[in-house]
Image: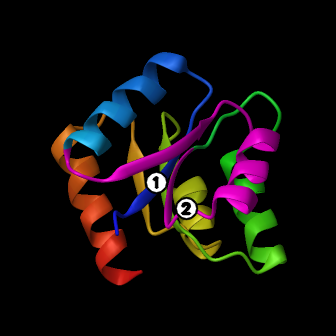
Amino acid sequence: MKQTVLVIDDSAYTRMTLIKAIEGAGYQVIGEAKNGEEALDKIITLRPEVITLDNILPDMTGLQILKTLKNEGIRVGVIMISAVGQQSAIEEAMSLGANAYLIKPYSKEKLLNELKLVFKNA
C-alpha cells in the first residue's frame, strides 16, 4: 500500500509544487486543502498517514489545526511548512504533535528526507 499524504496550503502554486515533489518520490497524495476548515474535513474523511501543513491559512493557523487534532485524538504525521520561523512557533508546533517544521524556502531534498522520517516513525 502506498503511503498517503494530504497537502494543506492556501497557495495553489505551493500545493502543486509539493504534490509534484511528493508524488515524484513515490508517495500518494490523496487530497489537498486550501484552508483550515477544508483541511480538518479532509483529514477526518480521507485519513491520510501524513499531512504537510502551512502555518498561515486564511481562516486559522496550522497551530490551531494541530490543537484541534490533538483535542479530537486524531493521530497523523505532520510536517509543518511556514515562512514563520520564530522559535516559539516551532516549539509550539512540536509540542502539539508536529513531527517536523520546515521554514520556507526549503529544499525538495529536505522535504523528502523529513517525509521519509515521518513515515518511518509513524
Going by the image, does 83 lie left or right of 35? left
Disc 1 marks a residue whose amino acid type is: Val
Q: Residue furthest left?
A: 109
Q: Residues within 10 Å of mark 2 (few under 14, many from 20)?
A: many
On whether residue 68 falls in the magenta region, the answer is: no
On whether residue 36 falls in the magenta region, the answer is: yes
Q: Give the Cα separation between the discs numbered 1 and 2.
A: 5 Å
Identity of the residue drawn at 22% across and 51% down: 26
Position of residue 45 measured from the top left corner of the image (x, y, whole percent)? 73, 58
Residue position marked by numbered label 2 in the rendering: 48
Q: How many marks?
A: 2
Q: Is residue 111 above or below residue 12?
A: below
Q: Can residue 69 be seen here?
A: yes
Task: Say which mark, if any, is on residue 29.
Answer: none
Disc 2 marks a residue whose amino acid type is: Pro
Q: Can residue 105 be seen here?
A: no
Identity of the residue drawn at 71% across and 45% down: 39
- Helix or strand or loop: what does disc 1 sit on? strand
Q: Is residue 31 above or below residue 28?
A: above
Determine the image quadrant of residue 95. bottom right
- Helix or strand or loop: what does disc 2 sit on? loop
Position of residue 81 measured from the top left corner of the image (x, y, whole percent)? 47, 44
Residue position marked by numbered label 1 in the rendering: 5
Position of residue 108 measured from the top left corner of the image (x, y, whole percent)? 21, 39
Is the C terminus in the top left, top right, bottom left or bottom right quadrant? bottom left
Going by the image, does 42 lie left or right of 53? right
Q: Which residues are magenta?
A: 25-53
